[in-house]
Amino acid sequence: MLALAPDAASQKAAGGVSAPRKWSAMGVSGTALWGECAGSGSKPYQACVDLSEPAYRCSCPSRKFPCKHALGLLLLWSADGVPPAAEPAPWVAEWFAQRTARAEKATEKAAEKAAKAPTAKDAEKDESRVRQREERVAAGLAELERWLSDQVASGLADARQTGLAEWSDLAKRLVDAQAPGLAGTFTGLTRVFRDENWPGRLLGEYAMVHLLAVAHRRAAELPGDLRETVRQRVGYQVAKETVLALPPIRDEWQVIARRDEERDRLLSRRVWLHGRATGRVALVLSFAPPGQPLDASLVLGTRIDADVSYYPGAAPLRALIADRYGPAVPARTPASGVEVEGVPQVIADVLTRDPWTESWPLVITGARVGRDGKEWCLLGGSGQGLRLRPSAGDPWRLIAVSGGRPVTVAVEWTPDGLRPLTTWDENDEVVVL
């Protein structure tokens, strides 16, 4: 049950609220599990779980899904601590009814959309919208190229004082030009000032943006998969229906890591998968507004036999689950991966195909934790080391799990170093880092 937790802190907090004395008005009926947990206020928190997905609801103010109360209730239920009931409590039944109504409404809308045949006038409007966007994006990127040229010509010395305001203004203009992908690049550029050699880092960032703008301008000359990568980096979206229509890859996909983030008042969940037979990696993204649950169908520490469809691109990573063949089952330590010495070659191949890649998941086998000067590293059998991302902090949890022995670690490669995600202990249990 703890594998459902969004982070290690939630796992620990769930243990504190899983005692029976904390709960009242508990029950389980069919796929409905519910209970009321004593909190700091006068009213208990009402928590319930739809065991079929699972899905969660709790009256507490936490933005984590599942929250500690839902997790604690699941722990109590798994230990046979929740009594059966003939029917759900009224507030639980109301929640289930709302979920059913939303699902039915979504199905009806999808059916109506599928039944509505497009007319010649609709097709003409669609073509006009596509043409107008292409023109706006082209104009916005032409302005961006001129701006970058001016920046290099005038020098970067004043970037610390003027950069933030200029980048904010430029990002807004790129959004107006319908190039949100490039706009997002400028909203996070202040990170370069953390580097002592920030002028060189900033120049490198500008160079990658310029490369993308030029690639878009010359898209007709590019191979099809690279052209798709460029368009998506600029901000063009690919419809789910288009992705699911592409040939899928069937494998036993292990959920190796998961991370939730909140940015611009939107919750996102990143779930990384590793194919048992193919060795391929995949990233499944889901989003939800604050207060709404994220997709919880991919549980850390399990694997599923499924078809996975990748978004088109030169270095495919983001994917969708197309079809599943049976329920998820517990997973052990991944049987395959890459050794520390092989990581540079893997990343070099990815960057050759998609030079704008900012992160890539890896399963590293036979790794030890050590230091190279002041920096923490993952060391291979030859002593070669790959530095860990400084912002990830000291890897004490990884050190404790490994006990000095070689371990398998799931990491996220970034230009600033490796970010440890999960590892597996001597009992093949997944541990969130």
Image (cartoon, grey):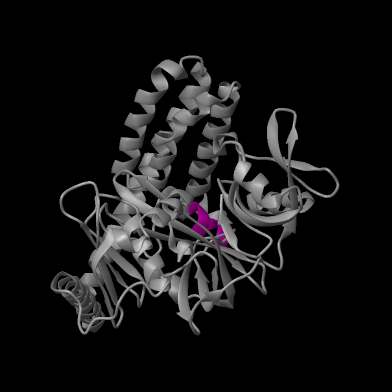
Q: Name the image quarter holding the N terminus.
A: bottom left
Estimate the x, y position of residue 26 in percent, counting from the top left. 25, 70
**How many numbered marks are there?**
0
Instruction: Look at the picture and state if 345 lies above or below 101.
Output: above
Report if residue 199 is visible in the image: yes
Q: Nearer the viewer, residue 342 or 345?
A: 342
Q: Residue at x 59, y 21 (%)?
A: 196
Q: Relative to 208, is 36 on the left or the right?
A: left
Report if residue 314 is visible in the image: no
Q: Residue at x 47, y 67 (%)?
A: 299
Estimate the x, y position of residue 418 in percent, counting from the top left. 63, 44
Instruction: Look at the picture and state if 96 lies above or below 220.
Output: below
Q: Nearer the viewer, residue 378 or 238?
A: 378
Q: Relative to 9, is 28 on the left or the right?
A: left
Estimate the x, y position of residue 172 in percent, counting from the top left. 31, 36
What predominant SS class does the magenta segment belong to?
helix
Q: Is 107 within the magenta?
A: no
Q: Residue at x 38, y 29 (%)?
A: 167
Q: Nearer the viewer, residue 333 or 222?
A: 333
Estimate the x, y position of residue 230 in percent, counting from the top left. 50, 52
Q: Nearer the viewer, residue 92 or 241?
A: 92
Q: Which residues are magenta?
A: 225-230
Q: Relative to 343, is 381 on the left or the right?
A: right
Residue furthest front as drawn:
21
